[in-house]
Amino acid sequence: MTARISAPPVPAPPFSADHSPAHVRAAPSHPDPYPYYGRLARERPFFRDEANGWWVAASAAAVTEVLTSAICLTRPLSEPIPAALQGGAAAEIFGRLVRLRDDEARGRLKEAVTNAVRGLDLGEVAALAHRRAAELDDELGPRLDEATTTQFMFALPMQVIALLLGIPRERFGDVMGWLAAYGTAAASAGTGIPAMTPDLLRSGHHGAQALLDLASAVGSADAQRGPLFQALLREATRLGCDDERDVIANALGYMVQGFAGMASLIGLTLLALARRPELLRQVEADRTYLRPLIQEVARCDTVTSSTFRFMARDGRIAGHNLRQGDLIIVLLAAANRDPALNPEPDRFDIARKEPKSLEFGAGRHACPADKVAALIVEIAVGHLLTRGVPLERLEAGLSYAASGHVRTPLFKR
Ligand code: HEM
């Protein structure tokens, strides 16, 4: 049987007449999608959006069922790599990332990717992040305004991962541009947001090729590899993942995966503080509150608002009959507002007892980097607070990046 989905559906207009998002892919860039998400989690746990041609999993139970189902894959079987990317370097990264594969060889590779991240010495990562934050102060200049805050929140996390891989500092500017170009082309090919253009595709392939060349050079020089690259290579060899191109692509995958997520969580945490003066006073007085604060922001203002899966074959999910190739949008942000996951889920409370969150996913594709990502975000937010980040001005210049799945605040004057 042929798959029903081969190209990303074209999204309808983003907001409805009552100002709620018109569909789930318009929600991540909406100013306040949470009443909408909450309604879906409680009232429409799993449904078909006929207008857009996709299914939506919104309750914690439905989201967990999809993420842990063996017949829900990260790509349609008929199109493991989006047609738009075929034939260029972007396909070489996309098709090898553990995030976007469900083939058999991927299992061992994921284990290697996970072991390498989980084996990182968090004390060493923290020291590196503090040092790099101080260097960035010099590079970005003494004035911390809305624009430099945004630059810092993107630069620090990406550069810490780059240092852990062994990428030289003088390439950081290029790497940032290449990651953005590859990421935009991959998102466009996979979700239709932003719309694909020949320029966007060309720069995505160019960025991908430059990243592959750089990672190959770093990976083949013993003295240059950083601890994360070293560990990935060691684990991949130990587990019998013998295709060097898989290792190179997944070393880059650490940056591809972490880049927007950590930047977004830094920005969303700053906004949470800007909106809650009492909490800000608490954190100013005692920085140990930052950790539970970041955890609560990740639950309440979820960065990876949604992910997606495709049916490997006809089958039943959440009591519905789905067809091979059907697309399911998996609303992590809605599930985090489901009262079945946490009592009073709409209350922002950093003292919440044993909070449960699907921010980092679940099942075989769950994020291996939850601890290290939260640590880098904590150091970044702490550093920005010490530098006097203009919290009171962030809201006025706030917009959210165009994305069907990730909620990224951007600040400007
Ligand atoms: C705040 C930052 C981050 C957030 C919110 C986040 C969230 C997620 C989520 C929700 C998934 C699962 C996606 C799915 O099931 O479709 C995921 C997967 C993944 N993340 Fe993260 N992540 C973050 C940072 C990072 C960082 C820093 C790294 C690397 C150092 C990383 C590496 C990965 C990898 C390799 C996967 C793919 C796992 C797989 O498919 O088996 N993430 N992440």
Image: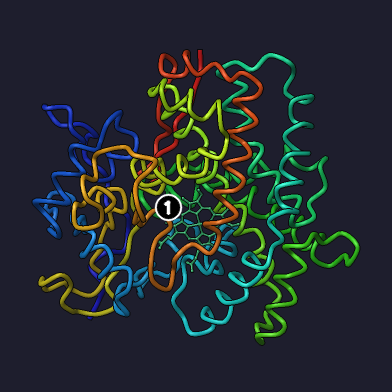
Vertical side of 29 occupied by 181: above or below: below
Q: Is residue 124 left or right of residue 343?
A: right
Residue drawn 42% across and 47% down?
Answer: 188
The answer, for residue 103, to whether it is visible in the render is yes
Quadrant of the frame with the N terminus: bottom left
Give the camera-side residue of 126 and 35: 126
The percent coordinates of residue 110 (x first, y second) are 55, 74
How crowded is the residue under tag 1: few (<14 C-alpha within 10 Å), some, or many (20+)? many
Which of the 4 image quadrants contains residue 287? top right
Instruction: Name the residue at the right extreme.
Output: 223
Vertical side of 105 occupied by 320: above or below: above
Amino acid type indicated by mark 1: Ala
Q: Is residue 58 left or right of residue 136?
A: left
Instruction: Name the residue at the bottom extreme.
Output: 240
Residue drawn 21% across and 36% down?
Answer: 21
The percent coordinates of residue 225 (x first, y second) are 82, 62
Residue drawn 64% across and 48% down?
Answer: 207
Figure label count: 1
Residue drawn 40% across and 35% down?
Answer: 402
The percent coordinates of residue 65 (x first, y second) are 25, 70
Label 1 beta carbon less than 8 Å to ligand 1: no
Tell me the SS state at disc 1: helix
The percent coordinates of residue 69 (x first, y second) are 29, 76
- The colour scheme used to paint the residues is rainbow
Residue position marked by numbered label 1 in the rendering: 189
Vertical side of 5 occupied by 352: above or below: above
Give the camera-side residue of 259 and 183: 259
The answer, for residue 195, to whether it is visible in the render is no
